[in-house]
Amino acid sequence: MPMGSSSKWRKARVALSCLHASSTVEDSSSPPAVQSAGRRSFGSGFISRSLSAAARSSESTEGTCAICLTTMKPGQGHAIFTAECSHSFHFHCITSNVSHGNQCCPVCRAEWKEIPFHNPSNLSRERERERTNTIAMPRANNAFMYGLRQLPPPHEPTSVFDDDEHVDHQPENGSLNGEAIDVKIYPEFSAVSRSATHNNFTILIHLKALSSRRQNSRAPVDLITVLDVSGSMAGTKLALLKRAMGFVIQHLGPSDRLSVISFSGTARRLFPLRRMTDGGRQEALQAVNGLSSNGGTNIAEGLRMGAKVMMDRKWKNPVGSIILLSDGQDTYTVPRFGGSSPENDYLLLLSSSINRNSDAGISIPVHAFGFGVDHDAAAMHSIAENSGGTFSFIEAESVIQDAFAQCIGGLLSVVVQELQVRFECVNPRMKLGSVKAGSYKATLEPGSKTGIIDFGDLYAEEERDFLVTVDIHPVGDSCNEMSLLKVKCNYSDPITKESVTLGEANINEVKIQRPETTGGDLVVSVEVDRQRNRLQATEAIEEARAAAERGDLSGAVSVLGRCLEALSETVSAQAGDQLCVALAAEIREMQERMANQRVYESSGRAYVLSGLSSHLGQRATARGDSTDSTSMVQTYQTQTMTDMVTHSQNLSSFGGSSPSVRPPQSFSAQPQPSMTDDLKNSEPLMGQPDSSLKCDFLWYELLDFKRATGFGGHL
């Protein structure tokens, strides 16, 4: 073994013993590792923090930088910074640490009144000096050559975030031109006798977004992640969040842009809106790796900054969205009222610029993720509902990556934008009755002859179903067929931005037969019955939730029980329809989560609200471990979502850690052994590799250490 490798290997052994004795991952108290060129920055962060813990406990490490673990002896050409607390570091290490938001000592956690930063005018000269100079320089001069910056006040004036990276849209030839939407219309009955009157006759309008016909082409995304890093996220939660963000970063393309915002008591933009090229991914991964947890939970401040990044951008990708994750309750903005707050209080959390119900609101959906059992489900659901997003309940912390994967699987497959459906009565005697479109805005024009529904964006293969009722009147003997409704769709092609209207040749019209007699009982359409069951189940879930919030859990369970009984008697349920089977299974799960107040408070409320978000928006949400494609609640999961979740689960199948979170290697063009091969060929470390999350990360980092040092033995 080389001499340098032997020293590093001894440090790794010390770190291993310290980490084994520690009860938590030190994400909340340790700085991100700053690696020299040719080493892995994301993965090395974890082992560097573990090694720094060992270094702090040993007297033999005096004169060693606690960040990079190399010596700080004079004559090595590196500037040295001594902090107010008397701890010293390489200046390039500590300034990189500070640039990722850490403003306290990595060793003793003392809060600094002044923080080091690079002076751009001197940076290039210093780098050149570091390459050539072998003479020791005084510590004080080194520090002030770069400069010290006063920490900003707690309520620093808001900046203008117009530094987003330029988008590079290549012109596309040809739009989908009507091929993006398939429309089908189903009447409740195919025939009604001429002399019959049928009030509230139901018509189902079914829409399906088709997959893009373009090869290797999709609409680029502007994604802003707003991440809770309060004190309650310390340890495993923060480590899992970093892993999930690594998955997201690696699956964004070079035309997609990402910005990362963290919040605790205040919000901080860690990473500007930048394209996910190789360099962009590298810097994004380093920013995420530098997350540390402390302080309270200010959701409103995080969302405000996220909305401002969206509003201030100079360039725009076709698809824009915000991902919000929090594991707690806002302790700054929303007053607490025994576990729930009025809806108007929750609206304080959402910036008016992205509230779709406000005059200034723009179409930027917030996909909210409630993490663990202590988050404010009602607040997160309200944020999602009022922005046009979804609310997911991540009950099992280990599925956070799968939940993110499902979400971006949809965002990376948008094929239709600004979809508006217009439907009107054909028969002059007919008027529209009710329109049931879930959470989508539906309006009836004066006279109730025409209705309009705005659906917004659709992912590839997503479906939207809504029900319209009309009254059927008797007709004359000469009428054998009767037209009821015609439907027209308008939408925008997200790539070409061309407005598309399904032309006259594609106008859909629904008709029914009007025979003299129908000759027996009318047979209801299974398609209509299925969607009526979905809407009735959703109404029952809303009623049960209202009862549960009043403390009437037995009444809530009874409401759901009656719904189950009614479902079982319907035509579609008796035919074994899968949607009805899924609804019944979900309702039974909700009944179990309303068994008592403790269970409802810890998981029932979040599970119910996530289900409502899914059914009202007809879009997949995560509930517990429901991102599994075999789960019965995944009624709305598209193929791209399923594929992305499967990929996430495959990456996590060995020890719970995803190899994809590492940035691309730049130090070697030689093929490296796969993580699977390493796990097969190496002996277990502290038991099985999946014994705990902190062991997982160290396991992979020591495997990387093994490769970097060339040590060929078993760990």
Image (cartoon, helix red, strand yellow):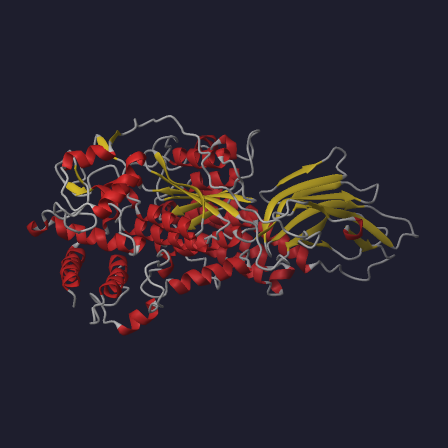
231 over 172 or under it: above or below: above
Compared with residue 328, is residue 711 higher up or lower down, i.e. above or below?
Answer: below
Residue 293 in the image, given as x and y percentages of width and height: 28, 42
Residue 629 locus on image (x, y percent): 48, 62
Q: Viewer-proximal residue, 135 or 196?
A: 135
- From where the camera sits, is residue 290 visible? yes
Q: Is residue 6 left or right of residue 45?
A: left
Q: Is residue 278 above or below residue 630?
A: above
* Residue plotted at (51% across, 51% down): 560
Query: Quick one: 68 or 304, which is closer to the camera?
Result: 68
Q: Is residue 395 visible?
A: no
Quarter of the image with the N terminus is: bottom left
Q: Position of residue 442 (x, y in %)?
A: 65, 39
Tell me if 611 is positioned left or right of 485 in this view.
left
Residue closest to the far right: 478
Q: Position of residue 333 (x, y in %)?
A: 38, 30
Determine which quarter of the picture holds residue 564: bottom right
Residue at 48% in and 61% down = 631
Q: What residue is shown at x 37% (from left), y 51% (from top)? A: 282
Viewer-nearest residue: 196 or 239: 239
Outermost residue toward the left? 59
